[in-house]
Amino acid sequence: MIILTKTPGDTIQFAEYVERNIRLYQIRNLCPLRPSAAASWIRRALAESLRSRKPYSVNLLLGGYDTASHDPHLYDDPRAVRCAWVWIVFHAEFFG
């Protein structure tokens, strides 16, 4: 599950890009992508986007359940230096 916020155009486009590429991985390799691997791939995709002329303007929260280890995972914004799972996330934006 991915929760994206910020600019509507960027969030929709990036969500579809991530969804289709993760699905393509599953079709090619006949196995689902684990949450930690998905978070790493999304982090790399955002890093490549930041180096381009038109980066995605999104805030991201990624959650998943690893069926192999039976563990839930929650990842905060992967644009951080490291992509680490967290227990609880609080994000607030103030306008005014």
Image (cartoon, rainbow, N blue to C red):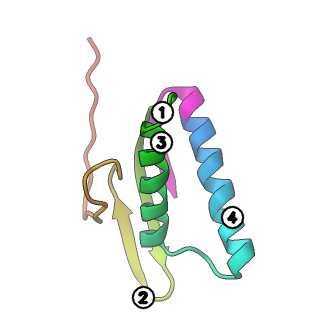
Q: Quickly name the residue at label 4.
A: 23
Query: What is the CA distance from the residue labelled 4 to the residue labelled 3?
Result: 18 Å
Query: What is the CA distance from the residue labelled 1 to the residue labelled 2?
Result: 34 Å
Is the C-beta separation of discs 4 and 3 under 8 Å? Answer: no
Q: Amino acid at mark 4?
A: Arg
Q: Quickly name the residue at label 3.
A: 4
- Viewer-nearest of labels 4 and 2? 4
Locate residue 60, reporting x and y percent: 41, 46
Outermost residue toward the bottom? Answer: 68
Query: What is the CA distance from the residue labelled 4 to the residue labelled 2?
Result: 21 Å
* Mark 1 closeness class: few <14, some 14–19, many ≥20 residues within 10 Å: few
Q: Amino acid at mark 3?
A: Leu
User: From what the image shows, is residue 86 above or below residue 60?
Assistant: below
Q: Quadrant of residue 10?
A: top right
Q: Amino acid at mark 2?
A: Ser
Is 25 on the left or on the right of 69, as rendered? Answer: right
Query: What is the CA distance from the residue labelled 1 to the residue labelled 3?
Result: 15 Å
Badge number at residue 69 = 2
**SS label for mark 2:** loop
- Viewer-nearest of labels 1 and 3? 1
Locate residue 92, reporting x and y percent: 27, 34
- Viewer-nearest of labels 1 and 4? 1
Is 81 on the left or on the right of 33, as rendered? Answer: left
Region in magenta: 1-10
Locate residue 28, reporting x and y percent: 73, 75
Is 11 on the left or on the right of 26, as rendered? Answer: left
Check the picture and name the quadrant holding the C terminus.
top left
Identify the residue at image location x=48%, y=40%: 49
Is the C-beta separation of discs 1 and 3 under 8 Å? Answer: no
User: From what the image shows, is residue 44 above or below residue 40?
Assistant: above
* Mark 3 closeness class: few <14, some 14–19, many ≥20 residues within 10 Å: some
Q: Amino acid at mark 1?
A: Pro
